[in-house]
Amino acid sequence: MKYCDLHCDALTASNGERQITRGHLTASGCFLQCFAAFVSEEKERFAAALGMADELDALCEKEGYHLVKSADELQEGKINALFTVEDGGAIEGDLGKLNTLCGRGMRMMSLTWNFPNELGYPSFPDYKGLCAGRVPFEKRETERGLTARGREAVEAMCGLGVLADVSHGSDRLFFEVADICKSYGKPFVASHTAANSVHDCARNLTDEQLRRLGDCGGVAGLYFCADFLSSDVSAEGQKRAILAHARAMLNAGGEDVLCIGSDFDGIPPNPAMKNAGEIPWLFEELIKEFGSRVTEKIAYGNFLRVLSER
């Protein structure tokens, strides 16, 4: 079954075995792969994002990916590629730089990563404390959301046709983005996340958030980061967890919400889903439980709709 993957970090993958390769994508039937320019720790974030746009151009030339800017440009029989940005700090608070990145083909941008920036605040209130073990894994940022410039950026994104991505964003940021996008009649996305009802983690969406996403016509991509899915990191435990998250996201948000957002090349290998080549087993299991029609919406239909409506 063909599918769309809303998020990977192949453009900034470190040394080691890649989870996103031409071979893996071909074997799994990938139709559209979103490639994120991740810039959070860069000093020259805008320049870094432009550099990664150049890297994607070169990667598409080398691997034969078909680079697209809209749903109309997608081609059957190709591995289509879409340029996205992870961490709105890439525009350095300058809406002119947002326009420039849009001109380079960016069609999705997350407002934050794990640290505050000019646009807003992340899901973890103290990421360094979390990494050092001083902050609980499930502690959520609930008070701080978009900045004034962040609200301006989301409004500008709605006008430009750039999907606002709330992945890594705080709870308040999520609902503020939802309100803005709703007022513009535009969908928004959580490109890589999971269900907090299955595993309590600040990076996972609550049922209320999943319902709101569905009400706004948006989608959520299910990621495969083992730590965010379950405390059971065995292969069987992770397989059960992936299916449980898919089930919970569908139950909360409806059949138009769920997509795939692997986060490959940004996460350690999941023992149940080591790389993109292993994605087909998930669709096989979803067909058994939900049937072919719903599974096709999860695999590609839901995101292609949002890409057309952006």
Image (cartoon, rainbow, N blue to C red):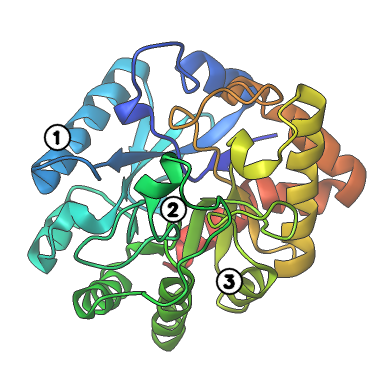
The structure residue drawn at horizontal position 43% and vertical position 32%, both measured from the top left corner, is 266
Location of residue 274 by image quarter: top right
State the separation of the CA atoms marked 2 and 3: 21 Å
Mark 2 residue element? helix
Location of residue 223 by image quarter: top right
Residue 224 in view (yes/no): no
Which of pointers 2 and 1 lies earlier in the amino acid sequence? 1
State the separation of the CA atoms marked 1 and 3: 32 Å
In this view, 118 is above or below 61: below
Res. 213 mark:
3
In this rendering, would 231 be left or right of 131? Answer: right
Which of pointers 2 and 3 lies earlier in the amino acid sequence? 2
The structure residue drawn at horizontal position 68% and vertical position 64%, both measured from the top left corner, is 256
Q: Residue furthest front?
A: 134
Quadrant of the rendering where the N terminus is positioned:
top right
x%, y% of residue 251? Answer: 80, 64
The structure residue drawn at horizontal position 42% and vertical position 88%, both measured from the top left corner, is 183
Q: What residue would you read off at disc 1? A: 51
Res. 71 mark:
2
x%, y% of residue 164? Answer: 38, 65
Mark 1 residue element? helix
In this rendering, would 299 be left or right of 19? Answer: right
Say which of 7 and 112 sits in front. 112
x%, y% of residue 48? Answer: 14, 39
In this view, 241 is above or below 165: above
Location of residue 99 by image quarter: bottom left
Q: Residues within 10 Å of mark 1 (few under 14, many from 20)?
A: few
Say which of 136 and 233 sits in front. 136
